[in-house]
Image (tube, rainbow, N blue to C red):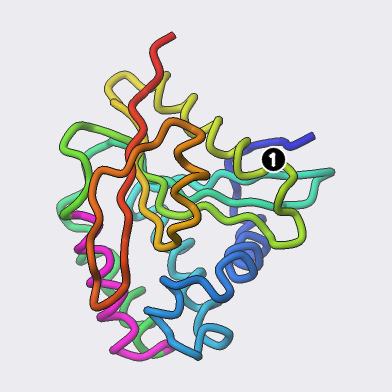
Amino acid sequence: MVKITHLEAKHIENAIEVFSAAFYGDPLMQFFFGSEYQNSGKYFWQYVCDIKEIINGLLLGAFIEDELQGVAFVSPPEESQNDIEIAIAPLKKQLKTEVGEEAVMRIDAYINLGDANKPIQPHFYLNTLAVHPKSQGKGIGSALLEKLHEMSTEHPYSCGVALDTEKEKNIAYYERFGYRVSTIADLHGLKVWFMFQANQKT
């Protein structure tokens, strides 16, 4: 039985462990960090968790028998704060110290590409979906997606859920849930598929 809940501060350390394990060998992490992911990844995922509050993000956790096995980092359709860059500047400065300026430049390039390819209409954005390798195939990703789709459907003005993937094999997985490829982009040799699923009418 998979239980989905909003993560609290006490869960962040475990969430970072899930993120780190799930994205080991991922093309996007290789683009960011090359062979240094094992050393740099934990700092990146800490940064992701730290900026969550600043960007009004959500962390959904999937638990099996009270053990965190999956995490989804989601941006709701509320309008972004105008001063986000100022607010996250100290965190980004710290990240540069930990992973290097070149890695942060690549992270920024990816974020800018994502911003340029997001749907115009209000939507939830699935920034990251992570399932611990030891728990894959147990329906955890499906449970997280279903919760996110439910949140989007119940939201007063969200039109659906958008995401991106750098693994071609993931496309068929997301298509099972109604997603369709909206754009394919190239990021310095890294292929990025942007996908969207409109809210299902009930």
In this rendering, position of residue 185 left or right of residue 27: left
Count the labels in the image. 1
- Please identify the dominant SS of the magenta region: helix
Q: Which residue is mark 1?
A: 139
In this rendering, position of residue 86 left or right of residue 75: left
Q: Residue at x 44, y 87 (%)?
A: 34
In this rendering, position of residue 190 left or right of residue 38: left
Nearer the observer, 35 or 66: 35
Asked where in the image residue 135 lies, by quadrant, the reply is bottom right
Point out the stretch of residues depicted in magenta: 98-115
On whether residue 104 falls in the magenta region, the answer is: yes
Secondary element under disc 1, as helix, strand or loop, is loop
On whether residue 197 falls in the magenta region, the answer is: no
Asked where in the image residue 54 lies, by quadrant, the reply is bottom left
Q: Residue at x 46, y 27 (%)?
A: 151
Q: Residues within 10 Å of mark 1 (few under 14, many from 20)?
A: some
Q: Residue at x 32, y 72 (%)?
A: 190
Q: Position of residue 165 (x, y in %)?
A: 40, 56
Placement of 95 over or under 153, stated as above or below:
below
Placement of 59 over or under 151, stated as above or below:
below
